[in-house]
Amino acid sequence: MRELRSLTAVAPGILFVEGPASNWTVFHGRSHVELVDCGYPADRPLVEESIRSTGLDASALRRIIVTHGHSDHLGAARDFSEGSGVEVLAAESELPNVRREITEQVTVADLLPVALRRGTIPWAVAAIRAGGLGDVGVPSAQAIVGEAIELSTGHRLEVVPTPGHTTGHACFFEPDAEVLITGDALVTGHALLADAGELQRLPTFFHHDAAGAEASARRLSLCDARWVLPGHGPALRL
Ligand SMILES: [Zn+2]
């Protein structure tokens, strides 16, 4: 059974959710909710559970902003969007991947060279069961306009382009709460990484452009951040 690993209220109206295998952040105001990422497709009930824990429900969801178009971050965004008009946003250069006009995602063939590494096969089976190979594209996804996003919850997200993991991968910084959402540019854990809790990069084969991912991770400034909320692994308080 899929279960939430942890819920962390990092600042007023900002709830970090550690899902079964990937994470999302719930921004909540008096009557609106916006998400950054939303887990795997199979995590939809858990996304709704996490929203209910704020005292609101899924009908309050206005928008899903994704760090990138991988299926463990896009989750059920298309269902949310088609069912109730929830807007889905991504960096303009990530839109082809989010809409699945192209696919920048690790494939079964990419995994063959590392298939014998400890943990790879159980991780791959779990990812497939969670909908990781399903058609998760969101044709109606729209581009982020400008360098910051004003949320309906009163928060503001500065967009930090971090290409490499995918072409249009973006991190988001909330300056008032000093919260940096790093997606898959930097993580603190993953089934295929040994050191849980340490800030690190995902294994190279997960990146569309490994050199670009490394350069983006090096450029990413942590000095203004009080919290790092990664795409995988627990929240990190600096
Ligand atoms: Zn990813």
Image: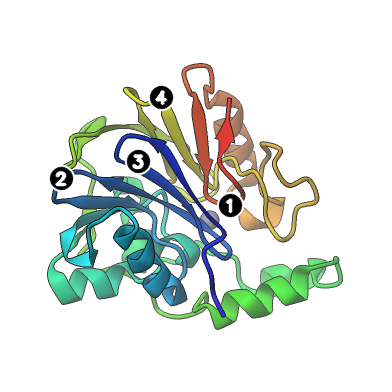
Q: Find numbered disc 2 in the image and state the secondary structure of the residue it sits on.
A: loop
Which circle marks residue 232 in the picture?
1
Task: For residue 125, say whether it is visible.
Answer: yes
Vertical arrangement, residue 102 with respect to residue 169, above or below: below
Q: Looking at this view, is 149 or 94 the one in front?
A: 149
Measure the C-alpha gap from mark 2 to mark 4: 21 Å
Along the polypeptide, which appears first: circle 1 or circle 3?
Answer: 3
Label 2: how many Cα within 10 Å (few below 14, some 14–19, many 20+): few
Along the polypeptide, which appears first: circle 2 or circle 3?
Answer: 3
- Contact between marks 2 and 4 (CB within 8 A): the answer is no
Q: Amino acid at mark 3?
A: Ile
Q: Residue extending furthest top? A: 223
Measure the C-alpha gap from mark 2 to mark 3: 12 Å
Measure the C-alpha gap from mark 3 to mark 4: 11 Å
Q: Amino acid at mark 4?
A: Glu
148 displayed left or right of 188: left
Q: Find numbered disc 3 in the image and state the secondary structure of the residue it sits on.
A: strand
Front position among marks 2 and 3: 2
120 displayed left or right of 163: right
Task: For residue 101, say whether it is visible.
Answer: no
Q: Amino acid at mark 2?
A: Arg
109 displayed left or right of 172: right
Instruction: Residue 117: give x, y in percent of width and height.
Output: 85, 66
Instruction: Residue 68: give x, y in percent of width and height.
Output: 42, 53
Front position among marks 1 and 2: 2
Residue displayed at 80% across by 66% down: 114
Q: Amino acid at mark 1?
A: His
Label 4: which residue? 178
Along the polypeptide, which appears first: circle 1 or circle 4?
Answer: 4
